[in-house]
């Protein structure tokens, strides 16, 4: 029985590819060959499904074709791999879809665990996750991170080899490792979202393909791990932050800061979903950094006007967050909240305490925040210097233009 072709095949394949890849890798333990097999199966589907309709069980169809491609691959290997050939032939002759569908753990989550293994650097884990789980091409990932395609291809290849050499079986980790491995998955998804929401370099403030892909994958993890409060916290944080995306830039792509955004453009449905999710999650106990960040985002999003923002509550939440996280950006944001509650002088005092942190020494946000607080404190000359210093340190063209515009505005007022 075939379904009518009433959905986007490209979108369906994008969703099914990581699931099929997870199943094939789990069965054959060969990431590179499995990825090739799933890619060939996807091409076959793209050619056949528009003519014949989408199968009643498209995931099983895709996985079965990939199994057969793996059988062909293994049959071509030397005699020393005869045992694997027998295994492949047995798998290729499986016709019952439930044999594929009844894995004890969801293969998409297993694939995320593998791609985000702590043995990989964050850069490698991001690239491998976007390639294997997100379905982005190497060229798309390279463009997102402003590196040559050949460089990104080498990074992905090294990541695959690192996973292969690790000897770690493709399966969800044992209970004693699960929390640590899941934290690595969440960290990679968080980094992908942040790079998409505010690109670190390039002509555009955001890369919606990256931020939306991070949200899609996090929604999957939340569906598979519904009782994990930090998974829920990260997903709520993404929903509440991404809800402001349309108001963050003007007609020419220029940056619009939070305080001056048109809040009518914020996505009310996303805000409602994010607020509901974090409201359900926080009372469950075991509060973590992602939940606190989501709570802060919710306070911002629930303020009808910038001047209605509950800064004392935000300051309290940053105080809690700072006690459980060594992230210097948390301390930087805590200084901003303190300035909004206790005055610019208090914020500048907290910034001075961050001077010794080498992680912020060359980061543009340190100078940008100082410039803003100096402006609030009534020292426009010093603010201009720091706005210009911040502009010289960022690789993002919209951020640089915004900072230089602020410096020029203050210079005219001197």
Image: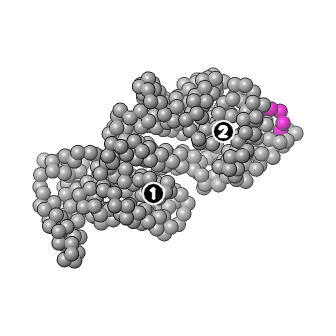
Quarter of the image where one finds residue 333: top right
Image position of 178 (left or right of 387): left
Q: Please, which residue is most extreme toward the bottom here?
A: 78
State the residue at coordinates (77%, 45%): 386
Does residue 176 appear to the left or right of 274 in the view shown? left
Magenta stretch, residue numbers:
376-380
Query: Could you say whether the residue bearing mark 1 is in a helix, strand or loop?
Result: loop
Question: Dot 1: within a 10 Å radius of its alpha carbon, few (fewer than 14), some, or many (20 or more) residues?
Answer: some
Q: Residue at x 60, y 31 (%)?
A: 318
Where does the image place residue 147, in percent across and percent down from the top left? 54, 63
For residue 120, the mark is: 1
Vertical relation: 3 (above or below) 288: below
- Find disc 2 in the rendering and name its residue: 332
Secondary structure that dominates the magenta span: loop
In the foreground, 371 or 77? 77
Residue ID at (75%, 39%): 352
């Amino acid at each position: 029985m075939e379904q009518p072709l009433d959905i986007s095949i490209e979108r369906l394949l994008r969703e099914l590819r990581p699931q099929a890849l997870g199943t094939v890798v789990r069965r054959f333990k060969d990431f590179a060959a499995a990825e090739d097999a799933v890619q060939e199966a996807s091409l076959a589907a793209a050619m056949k499904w528009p003519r014949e309709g989408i199968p009643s069980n498209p995931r099983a169809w895709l996985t079965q074709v990939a199994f057969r491609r793996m059988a062909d691959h293994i049959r071509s290997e030397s005699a020393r791999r005869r045992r694997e050939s027998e295994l492949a032939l047995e798998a290729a002759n499986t016709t019952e879809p439930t044999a594929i569908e009844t894995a004890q753990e969801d293969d998409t989550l297993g694939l995320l665990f593998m791609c985000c293994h702590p043995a990989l650097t964050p850069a490698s884990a991001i690239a491998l996750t976007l390639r294997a789980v997100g379905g982005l091409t190497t060229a798309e990932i390279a463009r997102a991170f402003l590196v040559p395609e050949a460089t990104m291809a080498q990074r992905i290849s090294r990541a695959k080899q690192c996973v292969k050499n690790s000897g770690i079986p493709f399966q969800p980790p044992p209970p004693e490792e699960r929390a640590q491995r899941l934290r690595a998955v969440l960290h990679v998804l968080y980094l992908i979202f942040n790079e998409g929401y505010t690109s670190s370099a390039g002509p555009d403030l955001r890369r919606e393909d990256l931020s939306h892909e991070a949200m899609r994958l996090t929604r999957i993890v939340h569906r598979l791990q519904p009782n994990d409060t930090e998974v829920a916290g990260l997903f709520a944080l993404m929903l509440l932050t991404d809800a402001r995306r349309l108001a963050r830039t003007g007609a020419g792509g220029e940056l619009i800061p939070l305080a001056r955004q048109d809040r009518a453009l914020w996505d009310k449905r996303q805000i409602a979903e994010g607020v509901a999710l974090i409201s359900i999650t926080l009372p469950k106990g075991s509060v973590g950094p992602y939940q606190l960040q989501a709570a802060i985002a919710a306070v911002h999003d629930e303020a009808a006007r910038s001047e209605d923002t509950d800064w004392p509550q935000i300051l309290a939440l940053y105080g809690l967050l700072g006690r459980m996280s060594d992230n210097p950006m948390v301390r930087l944001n805590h200084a901003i909240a303190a300035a909004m509650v206790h005055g610019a002088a208090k914020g500048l005092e907290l910034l001075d305490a961050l001077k010794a942190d080498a992680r912020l020494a060359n980061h543009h946000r340190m100078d940008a925040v100082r410039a803003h607080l100096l402006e609030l404190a009534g020292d426009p000359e010093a603010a201009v210097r720091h706005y210009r210093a911040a502009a010289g340190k960022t690789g993002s063209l919209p951020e640089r233009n915004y900072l230089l515009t602020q410096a020029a505005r203050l210079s005219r007022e001197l």
